[in-house]
Image (cartoon, grey):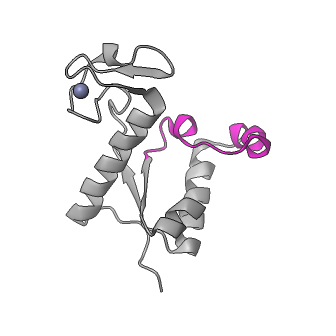
């Protein structure tokens, strides 16, 4: 959240399905987080974003972990294992989470630009 405020950029999140895998918190917070319902986590993020005046959009999470952020090639085998992404289309090698978050960010930008699904008003 601090990062988004500082850079003045928006946040993109996957729909609540699988959100726990995408949100990374420092260790002391992580324990509490896992006992939360996904919906509560979503509410928490929306609340924090509103308070900070950070634009927030929800994006379709489908295939974000299988899609190449470089060329857009989709293949289940692109995701070699938990941490490694190797594109069968263009051969790019990336950290699996980084690749997926890049896809989420790209989708978020698309949604944002389309002017749809903005759940947070601009800074008052
Ligand atoms: Zn590729």
Image quadrant occupied by the N terminus: bottom right
Work out which residue is located at the far bottom of the displayed protein and give it: 124
- In the image: residue 63, left or right of residue 29: left
- In the image: residue 61, left or right of residue 75: right
The spot of residue 49 in percent (x, y) is 54, 66
The image quadrant that residue 62 belongs to is top left
The number of numbered badges drawn on the structure is 0
Work out which residue is located at the far front of the displayed protein and give it: 92
**Camera-side residue: 119 or 4?**
4
**What is the magenta range?**
14-35
Q: Is residue 56 visible?
A: yes
Query: Magenta span has 29?
Result: yes
Vertical relation: 46 (above or below) 67: below
The image quadrant that residue 88 belongs to is top left
| Residue found 50% across the figure and 74% down from its top | 53
The image quadrant that residue 112 belongs to is bottom left
| Residue found 66% across the figure and 45% down from its top | 25
Vertical relation: 86 (above or below) 53: above
């Amino acid at each position: 959240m601090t990062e988004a405020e500082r850079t003045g950029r928006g946040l993109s999140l996957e729909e609540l399905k699988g959100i726990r895998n995408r949100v990374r918190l420092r260790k002391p917070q992580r324990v509490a987080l896992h006992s939360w319902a996904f919906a509560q986590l979503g509410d928490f993020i929306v609340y924090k974003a509103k308070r900070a005046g950070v634009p927030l959009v929800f994006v379709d999470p489908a295939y974000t972990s299988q899609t190449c952020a470089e060329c857009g090639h989709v293949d289940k085998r692109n995701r070699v294992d938990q941490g490694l992404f190797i594109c069968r289309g263009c051969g790019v090698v990336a950290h699996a989470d980084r690749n997926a978050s890049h896809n989420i960010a790209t989708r978020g930008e698309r949604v944002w630009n389309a002017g749809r699904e903005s759940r947070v008003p601009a800074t008052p």
